[in-house]
Image: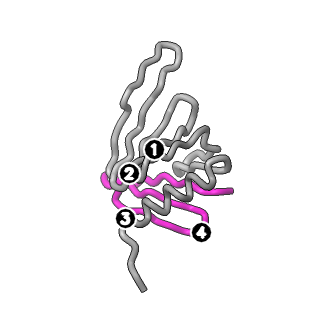
Amino acid sequence: MSVKTAEDKFQEFCLFVEKNKFRLMVDNGRFERKVTRVDVIDSECVQIYLTDETCVFIYVDTIEYVYIDWVFEQVSNLRSDGIKQWNVASKKYELEYEDEFKTLSFYVD
C-alpha cells in the first residue's frame, strides 16, 4: 500500500474541484455554503470563491484569503495560513491549518 503525499492529495483535490465545481460546498466548522465559483489555475493553484467578494487561493501547503471590492475595483489580502495536513474522505477534502485548530472542508452534498 502506497502512502499519498500532500502533493498527491492536492492533485486529486484539483481534479475533484474541477469535476464538482457546480456542486461544491464549503464548511469552516461554523457555517456551510455553496461555493460561488471555482478556477483551477494550474497544477499548483486552485482559486475558489467562497462568496462573490471572498476567495481563497489554495496551494499544496498554503491557503491565501483575498477580499475583492467590485465597486472600487480593489483587492485586499486578508491572511495566509499554512496547511498542516490534507484529510481525504469520500467526496470530501479537509484542510487542517498549521497554526490554529481550524479546518476548511470542501465536499459534494
Q: Residue at x 38, y 46 (%)?
A: 63
Amino acid under disc 3: Ala
Ranked by sequence position, the earlier of labels 4 and 3 is: 3
Q: Which mark is residue 14?
A: none
Between residue 100 and residue 26, name the one nearer to us: 26
Which residue in the structure is indicated by mark 3? 6
Structural distance between the alpha carbons of marks 2 and 4: 22 Å
Residue under pointer 4: 90
Instruction: Residue 60: name its quadrant.
Output: bottom left
For the stretch drawn in magenta, the main secondary structure is strand
Residue at 53% over, 51% down? 29
Q: Position of residue 6 (x, y in %)?
A: 37, 64
- How packed mark 3 is, by other alpha carbons closer than 10 Å (few <14, some 14-19, many 20 or more), is some
Q: Which residues make up the magenta segment?
A: 83-109
Q: Is tag 2's residue or tag 4's residue first in the polypeptide sequence?
A: 2
Q: Secondary structure at mark 2?
A: loop
Q: Residue at x 57, y 62 (%)?
A: 92
- What is the distance, in whole Å, between disc 4 and disc 3 at their CAs? 17 Å
User: From mark 4 to mark 1, how far is it between C-alphas?
Assistant: 24 Å
Viewport quadrant of the C terminus: bottom right
Residue type at tag 1 = Ile
Question: Residue tagged by mark 1?
Answer: 41
Colour logic: one colour
x 49%, y 47%: residue: 40
Q: Is residue 47 above or below residue 29?
A: above
Q: Is residue 8 magenta?
A: no
Q: Are marks 1 and 2 in contact (CB under 8 Å)?
A: yes
Which residue is the site of mark 2?
A: 44
